[in-house]
Amino acid sequence: MGKDEEGEKGVGSEEERVGKGSGYGKGIKEEEGLGETGSAGEGQEVKKEGDERKEDVPGKEKRKTRRSQRWKKKRQRRIMKKKKPQGKVGKQNLKKERRRKGRKVWEEEKKEDGVKWMQLEHRGPYFAPLYEPLPEDVRFYYDGDNPEQEGPMDELVCGVGTGLLPGSTSSPEIPKNGGSGKPLKLSLATEEIATFYAKMLDHEYTTKELFQNNFFHDWRKEMSSEEQEIIKDLDKCDFREIHKYFVDKNEARKALSKEEKQKLKEEADKIQEEYGYCILDGHREKIGNFKTEPPGLFRGRGEHPKMGMLKRRIMPEDVTINCSRDSKIPEPPEGHKWKEVRCDNTVTWLASWTENIQNTLKYIMLNPSSKLKGEKDWQKYEVARRLKGVVHTIRAQYRKDWKSKEMKKRQRAVALYFIDKLALRAGNEKEEGETADTVGCCSLRVEHIQLHPQLDGQEHVVEFDFLGKDSIRYYNKVSVEKPVFKNLKLFMKNKDPSDDLFDQLTTTFLNKHLQHLMDGLTAKVFRTYNASITLQEQLKALTNPEDNVAGKLLSYNRANRAVAILCNHQRSVPKTFARSMEVLQEKIDAKKKQVEEAQEEVKKAEDEFKETKDAKAEANVGKKKQLLKRLEEQLAKLNVQATDKEENKQIALGTSKLNYLDPRISVAWCKKFGIPIEKIYNKTQREKFAWAIDMAGEDFEF
């Protein structure tokens, strides 16, 4: 959309309605001005053309002048109307405005390559509140036997705290970390970090030696010299009183009255309204994670070597802001300044900083339902769909390369076979010791596979056993083609268990090869392609058009589950699973009893009708049968629910549904079989996949 077009359609007036003093709108107002200037320029051109025509056709001069004057007045009224204050714009008004314009955000004109937006304005991140000291009656105890310590230990000078408490999860035992000790008054900085540990006392992390060592090491670095002289042993620390304080505080929050909870919700909504939205090319877009992560203790996945280390508070001085040049730059908190203000419209993040644990960049991004995210999703699945047209050629190529004279090509071909057949992640290079010992296909070691010429009635079986992303164990036994098996034996020859299986292969080399085969193709695209194809094929095979809605939904979940198994999307069995299954079984048993009683009632009614042949008795039979039918349907639904729950207890369906499955497949399936989309996608997911819901018909094929 050009600037003139934006000016004509009143984008500026739309932004003025966002509200005064909100920090939004300057960029759009200036854009509106450009639009008016551009339109005025067009008006001048029309006038010149008219003047030329006046000389050519003198008889039309008066009519042309009157028409030009009417056009100018009409345009002036339109401009004045746009400048008229309209008040605050809400979600509904924006939706109405977009409907009035008759075009959806994903249908707007594409910008030149690399450019993501022309105008971006926001308030910057919302920073975690400062640390609030513990009440005087909540104390930390230390069994400190230190002869050099002079004076009572509870008279150390307090420092300045710099943190906020993270949430905690539950685990049965609370380690004592000491017992009887003397109360010790900590400086604020030291006390704050102590609360991070205290809040996690009921979590299994605090029982791990690595977690304890990393925490204590970082904690001591933040202590004052006096505290360092006293606190030398974590086992002598007693955090239980602090832990109890936060447990009680959490319980008190749960016990708040409805009015108090509503007040807290209103406060949260106010923050969301102020910081949770940005203006992107004339659209009010929701921001995904507008809050900086509070300080706390790093957990990591699996046996992460840095678990327990101190995550520092993010300050404005750490943050780089990204916005458009003509927008109002967000103001940092009083007394602070931004690290940098950037105007880079080739990226989609709004703010960024580097976290201190793994030294990686963190970003504030748009919400998944935003225009840019929708476009990115759409493009991702379109690339995967294009792979469908060339995948047979690629497969023929890597089969040919299994016999290549170059070892590098052979390794690439075998790795690509695994990525394609098993949907393995490529496995990016990483610094040794910096992260948990997780691997992908290219970083597999000899110890991660075993070769079996014959196993369980199959030939050429490869047994995989390794930790994948997020320390999720990947265990699988796969029968492979004979050339693959022979190549693996060759790759493993004369190597130690800790040596790389594909020692001449990197993901960079693999992806460069894939780019030559198809533009935009990477190893990750195979995962998206195979997941989507699997869902589509499974839905065709499993869906019975005669089933009721519950039966069709069970088929959908089973198809989704096949994808989750392919992609190794596992989860641990929820702690509440056993109890929730008990509750469900109780409902099933109760419903069975109701069905049995209803069956007896039907039999009685039928016997009564046989005896009386009465119309009233006949109506009663029909009524009892209807009730029985309804109860049987309810029982069937509960049984389906129980089956679904049991089958899903260790499978995470959400990951593939949100990241690997083309949503148009699910939308088309819903439309074809009359399933409400609400049964498949919740409200947030429907917003994320609005483009797919609008685009896909029941005949869509991936």
Image (tube, rainbow, N blue to C red):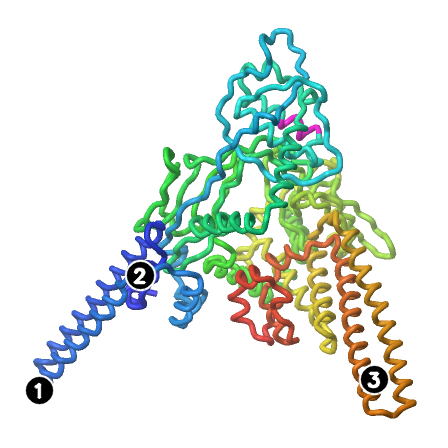
Distance CA(mark 1)–CA(mark 3)? 91 Å
For disc 3, the marked residue is: 621
Q: Are marks 1 and 2 in contact (CB under 8 Å)?
A: no
Q: Position of residue 237 (x, y in %)?
A: 67, 22
For disc 1, the marked residue is: 59
Return the disc, 1 or 3, that comes first in the chain's sequence: 1
Where, by quadrant of the figure, is residue 248 drawn?
A: top right
Residue type marked 1: Gly
Camera-nearest residue between 105 and 502 = 105
Residue type marked 2: Gly
Q: Is residue 155 visible?
A: yes
Q: Residue at x 11, y 76 (%)?
A: 51
Q: Nearer the viewer, mark 1 or mark 3?
A: 3
Q: Position of residue 224 (x, y in %)?
A: 53, 18
Q: Which mark is residue 12?
A: 2
Residues packed near mark 2 inside 10 Å, few (<14), some (14 to 19) or many (20 plus): many
Camera-nearest residue between 541 and 137 = 137
Residue type marked 3: Val
Q: Is residue 661 magenta?
A: no
Q: Is residue 404 visible?
A: no
Secondary structure of the residue carrying tag 3 is: helix
Is 117 on the left-hand or right-hand side of 387? left
Q: Is residue 332 above or below residue 583?
A: above
- The kind of secondary structure the magenta stretch mainly shows is helix
